[in-house]
Image: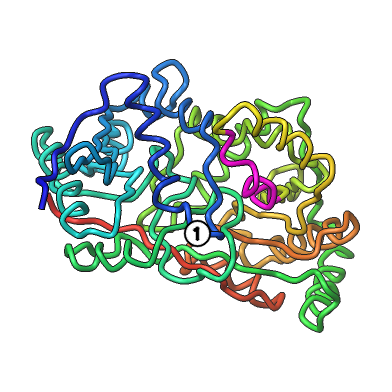
Amino acid sequence: MTDIVLRSVQNRADQRRFLTFPWKIYQKDPLWVPPLLPERMDMLDPQKGVFVQRGDVELFMAYQGDRLVGTICVGEDPPTNLNRGTKECVFGFLEYIQDYDVFQSLLSKAQEWGRERGLDTLYGPWNLDYENGYGVLVEGRDAPPALMCGHTPPYYSEFMDRFGFQPARAQNVALRITLEETPQIRRLSRLADRIRSKGQVQVRKANFDRWSEEVDIVHGLLGKALAHLSDSIGWHRESLEATLAPFKTIADPELILFAEVGGRTVGFLPGIPNLNEIFIDVNGLRYPWNYLQLLWLMKVRKPASLSVKSVLVLPEYWNTGVIVLLMDELASRARERGYDWIDMSITSADNPTSVLTAEKMGAEIYKRWQVYHYPI
């Protein structure tokens, strides 16, 4: 067997080869939604990439002879490590052929890289973004992933287990909520009506004209609403704004909901069109003509699902009906706009608010992902 050699990405051509390698892995997978290549290139751009501006990053490609067989990105995130009191080496862009030796070589390089920098744990996979396409898919290969959700072959989780990786957190899940008038939906609506009649909780749409202020509000909610999770990474303000920025042009502000009590914002529930239903057919905008395909499809195809990427309610309002009112309001507005179902992803399975409320609406978990750690 030809030896496996790891090479560091050195230039723009290497970078493109690194980022387009997944097209080889998933070329026969009809469920794969190609990542948007321009967005991936921006993530690695020192002038645009939020992670690379605050951390240390290196990309590696694994070769057998002249054949590219795997990729991995390793990075150190000093502000996050300082905030959490950890020494983690994050890794991502982990793609490889079905060959355990290739996988082992990639992860051994990640260990070596982290060890040289005094780090003590591999943590991932994260693609330099703690909210987009992270983890390894462990359940749910009968449907394409929704917006910002990852997709991996079955052997990826098998190799993680074989190497000795352990779960770093509870599994993350995607739930499917039908917008048909089911008994569960009607029951939730009756409960929401009782809460609404008391007049204590007000629901408003997002105001994109004061975008920066809305981002500040979401950032504040994130810090408090998720603090109970032991593995909460915490959000950097600039990372949040970079994550939310693309949605400003595609989202309907009537479906980005805030809950207020006495003028104080206590909850947030954003519904975004699941554009993966379109992106699955535009080849990740890899070639110029793919942009024309995207423009055409955006005109003629309306996504059937609305994707909810975050459910935030301040802990002191968990049992006050805020989440019920937000969910009912979103379901009603989504139904009026012709959506068939809501994807709620990628939330932690042990989240005490979003999962339980979704299940009361008749939601079913249809995908699961796992993030791992391993001592260096």
Q: Identify the residue at image location x=60%, y=32%.
A: 216
> Which residue is nearer to you in this view: 345 or 15?
15
**Colour convention of the picture:** rainbow
| Region rendered in magenta | 274-285
User: In the rendered image of this protein, does residue 64 appear above or below residue 200?
Assistant: above
The percent coordinates of residue 244 (x first, y second) are 61, 35
Q: Quadrant of residue 55?
A: top left
Residue 111 position in % (x across, y down): 14, 45
Front one among 366 and 26? 26
Whether residue 312 is visible? no
- Residue holding disc 1: 29
State the residue in front, 153 or 340. 153
Write the residue at 86% across / 76% down. 181
Q: Please tell me which residue lies in front, 125 or 230.
A: 125
Residue at (58% x, 41% y) in the render: 283
Specify few, some or many for label 1: CA neighbours under 10 Å numbering under 14, 14-19, or 20 or more.
Answer: few
**Is residue 225 in the magenta section?**
no
